[in-house]
Amino acid sequence: MGIAKLFPNTSRIWLSISPAILINHADIAEKILSSNTTFLDKDTFYEMLKPWLNEGLLTSASKKWRSRRKMLTPAFHFNILEQFLPIMNEQAHILSQVIQDRQTKAGDDYIDVVPLITNATLDVISETAMGVKIESQLDKNRDYVDAVTRVSTTAIKRMLLPWLQYNFLYFNFFTEGRKHRKDVNLVHQFTMNVIKKRKSEIQDQKNPKLDSNANEYSRRLAFMDLLIEQHLKDPK
């Protein structure tokens, strides 16, 4: 935030030994993203995310990024997003309650709200995109929640330390790398179980006995449903 205020348009920072240009104004970002596909190619730093996210919308290069973005745009239509407002409101209420409880226990001391907001964000994303109540704000599913936290933190650390950026060395000769792989596998196993369950439910919707609650559930899972439907049409 401080850099953006000091340099409202663009600024340069150093990530490890590599320079990076920060775009701090929406109009500039729009021109770059819409004018030249060259700028859509991801930097090598994104390679640190691929063990976790594979080659998805965040990490894919220009051609694949454009096609997938076009495919996913309907899932973010306002009419669909409005259906998720009750979930967001519920999680925001829980967050405010958690902050209040933590502050009461802390007394006059400061509390770190970053992990609390992170948990709230994870709960919102998990329920809106996957239809799963993680309830990380209520200290449930800690194995998965803690693994997600460690994976994201470690990925950023690898971006900043050049000697951790070579996958073969990192995953085979560093204790941290082996732990990172274990966490990634845990996260993938959890999400794959959710996807398999939802895929089965979509296929079962051909059954006329499916109840109204299931129909409502399917409408609210626009994002995951869209991905699964595309996969069923083209498994590649």
Image (cartoon, helix red, strand yellow):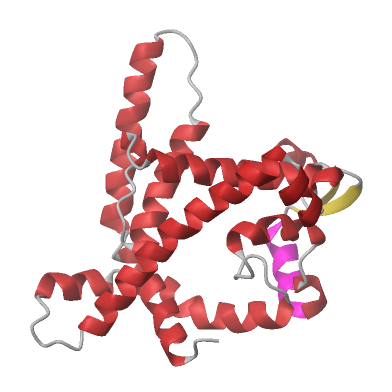
Q: Residue at x 62, y 46 (%)?
A: 180
- Residue 1, given in percent of the width and then of the height, sits at 68, 39
Q: Is residue 156 left or right of residue 57?
A: right
Secondary structure, magenta segment, majority class: helix
Residue 18: give x, y in percent of width and height. 90, 50
Task: Answer whether residue 211 is magenta in the image.
Answer: no
Q: Is residue 7 in view?
A: no
Quadrant of res 99: top left
Which portion, as a residue range, is magenta? 25-36
Q: Is residue 146 visible?
A: yes
> Could you say where residue 104 lies in the image, as x and y percent from the top left?
34, 14
Question: As drawn, which residue projects farthest toward the bottom?
Answer: 233
| Magenta-span inclusion, residue 32 | yes
Percent coordinates x, y for residue 174 in the rendering: 75, 41
Q: Nearer the viewer, residue 121 or 78?
A: 121
Query: Would residue 229 appear left or right of 94 to someone viewing this image?
Result: right
Q: Residue furthest top?
A: 108
Q: Is residue 190 above or below residue 222?
A: above
Q: In the rendered view, tell whether residue 47 sits above or below residue 195.
A: above
